[in-house]
Image (spheres, helix red, strand yellow):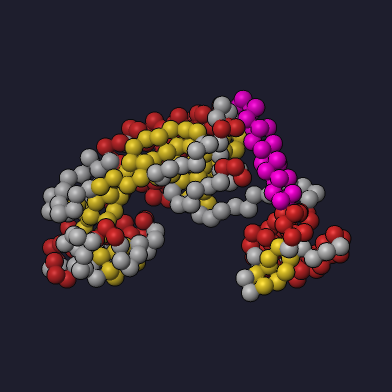
Amino acid sequence: MAKSRIAFKLYWCNYAPMKDWDDYRLILTLHRSKTLRGAALQLNVNHTTLSRRLVQIDKKWGTKLFERTSDGYTATNAGLQLIQTAEQIEELAYTSERQLRSVDKDLSGDITLSIPGAIAQFLLLEDLNDFSKIYPNINLQIISSYQFADLDRSEADVVIRGTAMPPEHLVGHKLFPYYVAVYADKDYLDSVARDDWCLTAPVAKPEWVEGTSYANLPITFISDDPVLRHQIISKGHAIGRDACYMADQEPNLIRLSDYTAIPGQDLWVLTHPDLRNTPKIKTLMSFLYSKLKAKKDLIVGKAGDAIQ
């Protein structure tokens, strides 16, 4: 049996494919991070060393490239000119990298997939494992994130996202919206009087409760992590709005009938146009599209009924 080769990450990697352009890279990184410490972390050097290098670069160019202000390091006019050049070099390097990868005709090598953790865990985990077994020569690296990966900067090769408006230049497949509804654990409903219910939500005053029977309920668990909110509901600690594709798979959860399931954002499977004809990218995108399409009823909330 082929060995599954999937690498999971819960944070962004620092992509830096360019070589022999240390001055430009330092200037660009400091401009983006605004602090020596932040830039040093990204460049994997000591911030004292970075400070000395900045002094050396100023001497090399014969002018100050940054001013230290209350908002951090701010580029001077000379610094802005070099930053513009650095951005052009960086973009050229990323473009060259994508174009080189696009001529790869083999179903082998690395693919980086950026996917929300909830979708990976509740919809595609087994499918991704199957893909790795079917194509053992493809090394699938999965970045779990709810931020939209910058495909222009090669932060990922393929993304799955719920969005109303993806970047126009990206290419791929639009599916359908995921649906959300309000759920509660059966035992919670049996043991807690309605007047004593509490909510979990991503913010202190979620807009969705306005005009509903839940508007005055206290919010005892606030989290921006949809999987954590799902666990809070599933463990019987609160009621809350949950994605149907997560909640309808839990036999202990009941969809509350006084809040109609509503659509969230459309799901998309996308890649950069430079990679659209690369065989391994096309293979992964077609695989993901077919697996998500087969689970439409679960995603749009038809797999569960409001019974309370």
Q: Is residue 32 left or right of residue 170?
A: right
Residue placed most toward the observer, 107 or 136: 107
Q: How far across and down, in percent of the image, does residue 96 sit?
A: 69, 36
Residue placed most toward the observer, 69 or 189: 69
Residue placed most toward the observer, 66 or 217: 66
Residue placed most toward the observer, 21 or 280: 21
Q: Main secondary structure of the magenta part?
A: helix
Q: Is residue 38 left or right of residue 250?
A: right
Q: Is residue 37 left or right of residue 300?
A: right
Q: How far across and down, in percent of the image, does residue 109 sit?
A: 61, 35
Q: Is there any visible trace of residue 221 in the rendered image? A: no
Q: How many marks?
A: 0
Residue name at image x 35 percent, y 62 percent: 202
User: Does the stretch in magenta take in 28?
Assistant: no
Q: How far across and down, in percent of the image, does residue 253 sit?
A: 22, 54
User: Does the stretch in magenta take in 103?
Assistant: yes
Residue name at image x 13 percent, y 66 percent: 194
Residue furthest front in the image: 77
Residue name at image x 76 percent, y 69 percent: 51
Q: Is there any visible trace of residue 22 in the rendered image? A: yes
Magenta stretch: give its range.
84-107
Q: How far across and down, in percent of the image, does residue 24 sit?
A: 76, 54
Residue name at image x 45 percent, y 52 percent: 146
